[in-house]
Amino acid sequence: MSEVTRSLLQRWGASFRRGADFDSWGQLVEAIDEYQILARHLQKEAQAQHNNSEFTEEQKKTIGKIATCLELRSAALQSTQSQEEFKLEDLKKLEPSTLLPRLPSEPGMTLLTIRIEKIGLKDAGQCIDPYITVSVKDLNGIDLTPVQDTPVASRKEDTYVHFNVDIELQKHVEKLTKGAAIFFEFKHYKPKKRFTSTKCFAFMEMDEIKPGPIVIELYKKPTDFKRKKLQLLTKKPLYLHLHQTLHKE
């Protein structure tokens, strides 16, 4: 999968999620706009000539079907009929995940899979549609790999939000620059302000890349990618729980 294809999938996934969020919150005008704009982009890609497309013919058929489903949901929202023909639950089954697959292996090079298990928060149960944005930054806060968003958390229990999702690092460990760090930004929706907010963040530095479980501390927002003004979120023993797997040829 090329970087262009990855970028397109990430952008479409974010747009898809925005539309579904507006839809679930009852903001129908915004949802319809988001669905229609995304459907036009997808139809354009689905109808592109082979030489001008990043996708195979089979992939373009799938993209065209997703576009049609978006159009159906948009039409259902505008319908005066009480019974919706194409429900939000049906649409969500098609959500394109922005998580990227593992890179091809290279002799002597190490790939890293990070399983995000759970995050400890005193108000875990109150977080709406929580997810985590994962990025790899250099000392200046510049992205070294594509940014990835997890799906919305699988469940909330007591003081924990559970994810149980694997993130594939999009660069061989040996190729990361000195001083790089992997960031995890915990985000959730604030209905009163009608936007998604970063609640806290955590990061893992290169010397912490080791196989097995690890817990890392949580810091107050805003996310400090340069790691110069860090403030712990709480004195309570609440952390981000991860599990690392290293793959080496």
Image (cartoon, rainbow, N blue to C red):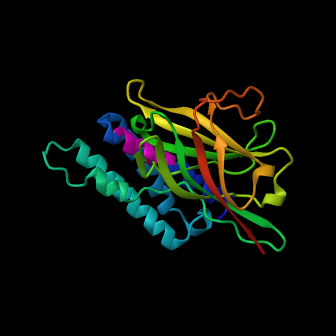
Quadrant where the C terminus sits is: bottom right
In the image, 204: left or right of 35?
Answer: right
Residue located 49% across and 66% down the image: 60
Residue 109 position in % (x across, y down): 81, 68
Residue 200 colored in magenta in the image: no
Name the side, left or right, on which 107 lies relative to 56: right
Residue 167 pos. (x, y %): 61, 57
Task: Look at 25% across and 54% down and name the residue there.
Answer: 86
- Quarter-of-image position of residue 222: top right
Q: Is residue 211 above or below residue 129?
A: below
The answer to if 18 sits in the magenta stretch is: yes
**Quadrant of the image containing the N terminus:** bottom right
Image location of residue 115, percent across then percent down: 59, 57
**Could you say which is closer to the camera, residue 215 or residue 236?**
236
User: In the depicted view, which residue is nearer to us: 41 or 181?
Assistant: 181
Type of secondary structure dominating the magenta stretch? helix
Q: Residue placed at 78% from the left, 66% from the top?
A: 110
Q: Position of residue 245 (x, y in %)?
A: 68, 64
Residue 6 falls left or right of residue 179: left
Q: Judge whether 95 appears above or below 50 on screen.
A: above
Q: Is residue 139 left or right of residue 19?
A: right
Which residue is at the far left? Answer: 82
Q: Residue furthest right?
A: 178
Residue closest to the eye, 65 or 23:
23
Looking at the picture, does residue 223 appear above or below residue 71? above
**How many numbered markers are drawn?**
0
- Magenta residues span 14-22
